[in-house]
């Protein structure tokens, strides 16, 4: 996820160089909402960026579990 958050930042910097803007609103739901939340948390107070960051996440995944088998448990029974 760190790479995705870094790529979003780099993409926004690239866009800002082409078409300057002052504010960014990152929006997502489900896993994209989690990514929006992580991005906002990491860069909301970053004064080195030439724009302000805000984020909105609907049903964002904040603590994903790897290797979660409980989801398929009913199928196996």
Image (cartoon, helix red, strand yellow):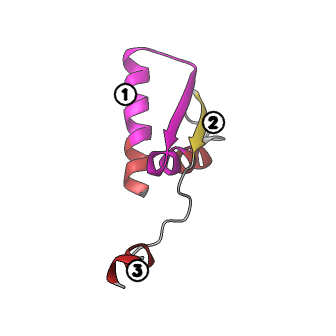
Q: Mark 2 and 3 residues: CB-CB less than 8 Å, in contact?
A: no
Q: Residue furthest bottom?
A: 77
Residue pointed to by mark 3: 73
Residue 75, quarter of picture: bottom left
Q: Residue at x 42, y 47 (%)?
A: 6
Identify whether 5 is placed above or below 28: below
Q: Residue 12: x, y in percent?
A: 43, 31
**Marks 2/3: CA–CA distance:** 47 Å
Q: Residue 56: x, y in percent?
A: 60, 37
Magenta region, residue range: 8-36
Q: Residue 24: x, y in percent?
A: 55, 27
Label 2: state its secondary structure: loop
Residue 13, quarter of picture: top left
Q: Residue 36: x, y in percent?
A: 52, 43
Q: Residue at x 37, y 17 (%)?
A: 18
Q: Which mark is residue 23?
A: none
Q: Nearer the viewer, mark 1 or mark 2?
A: 1
Q: Nearer the viewer, residue 39 or 57?
A: 57
Say whether disc 2 or disc 3 marks the residue closer to the N-terminus: 2
Label 1: state its secondary structure: helix
Residue pointed to by mark 1: 14
Q: Residue furthest top?
A: 19
Q: Nearer the viewer, mark 3 or mark 1?
A: 3
Label 3: state its secondary structure: helix
Q: Residues within 10 Å of mark 1 (few under 14, many from 20)?
A: few
């Amino acid at each position: 996820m760190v790479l995705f958050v870094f790529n979003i930042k780099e993409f926004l910097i690239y866009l800002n160089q082409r078409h300057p803007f002052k504010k960014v609103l990152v929006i997502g739901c489900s896993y994209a909402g989690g990514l929006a939340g992580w991005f906002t948390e990491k860069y909301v107070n970053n004064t080195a960026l030439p724009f302000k960051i805000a984020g909105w996440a609907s049903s964002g995944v904040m603590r994903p579990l790897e290797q979660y088998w409980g989801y398929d448990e009913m199928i196996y029974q």
